[in-house]
């Protein structure tokens, strides 16, 4: 149900609720008047006095529900999007841990490409590998397709330094093979 339909139903319900107490009085008097027997003018006058007295004592305005519509919930905020893959750092200009978007660097600029591998197997721990590659490798995301399960099994089972050197050697070989 959309928000408009819901608010329309609430407004109908509230207006029906406001008229309920008046409808009770009118229906009761109508039932008294509309029986199988015809009523005399004196009885009709007595019923009209009864209705006025009932309205005065019943105070239907005090019995009406308060209109308190529920506001719509706020729209959910968008989560900031993060780029998976490369974190580019130029040794010449930037500090070692400072992030730079690889798309603004020259293609032949050396960058450190950080790869975070989550614990995909039960015995693995989360690891970060830092590879030294050219900026065009980051821009074109050429490292990710080179990673396979066999390579992951090898680098995740050895110490971090050794795993980094194995991964660096593999990436260098594969990128050189693609260039020739």
Image (cartoon, rainbow, N blue to C red):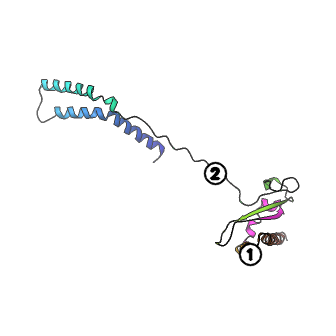
| Residue at point 38%, 38% (across, down) | 12
Report the side of 145 relative to 108 (left or right): left
Q: Which mark is residue 3?
A: none
**Tags 2 and 1 in contact by the CB under 8 Å rule?**
no
User: x, y percentage for residue 103?
Assistant: 79, 54
**Residue beneath label 1, please?**
154
**Residue beneath label 2, please?**
79
Query: Is 32 located above or below residue 74 in the figure?
Result: above
Element at label 1? helix
| Residue at point 80%, 65% (across, down) | 131
Q: Quadrant of residue 55?
A: top left
Q: Which residues are magenta?
A: 128-147
Q: How many marks?
A: 2
Task: Classify mark 2: residues with Cα within 10 Å, few (<14), some (14-19) or many (20+).
Answer: few
Query: Is 80 located above or below residue 108 in the figure?
Result: above
Element at label 2? loop
Query: Is 97 located above or below residue 59 in the figure?
Result: below
Label 2, label 1: how far apart the Cα atoms are = 35 Å
Observer-nearest residue: 99 or 23? 99
User: x, y percentage for residue 134?
Assistant: 84, 62
User: x, y percentage for residue 113?
Assistant: 79, 62
Report the side of 130 relative to 31 (left or right): right
Report the side of 153 relative to 11 (left or right): right
């Amino acid at each position: 149900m959309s928000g408009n339909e819901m608010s329309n139903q609430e407004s109908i319900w509230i207006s029906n609720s406001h008229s309920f107490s008046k409808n009770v009085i009118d229906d009761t008097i109508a039932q008294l008047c509309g029986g199988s027997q015809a009523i005399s003018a004196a009885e009709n006058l007595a019923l009209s006095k009864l209705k006025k007295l009932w309205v005065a004592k019943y105070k239907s305005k005090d019995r009406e529900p308060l209109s308190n519509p529920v506001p719509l919930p706020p729209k959910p905020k968008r989560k900031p999007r993060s780029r998976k893959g490369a974190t580019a750092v130029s040794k010449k200009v930037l500090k070692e841990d400072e992030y730079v978007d690889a798309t603004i660097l020259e293609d032949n600029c050396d960058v450190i490409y950080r790869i975070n591998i989550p614990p995909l197997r039960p015995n693995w721990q989360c690891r970060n590998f830092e590879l030294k590659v050219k900026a065009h490798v980051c821009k074109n995301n050429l490292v990710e397709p080179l990673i396979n399960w066999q390579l992951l099994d090898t680098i995740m089972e050895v110490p971090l330094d050794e795993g980094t050197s194995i991964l660096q050697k593999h990436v260098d070989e594969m990128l050189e093979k693609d260039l020739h």
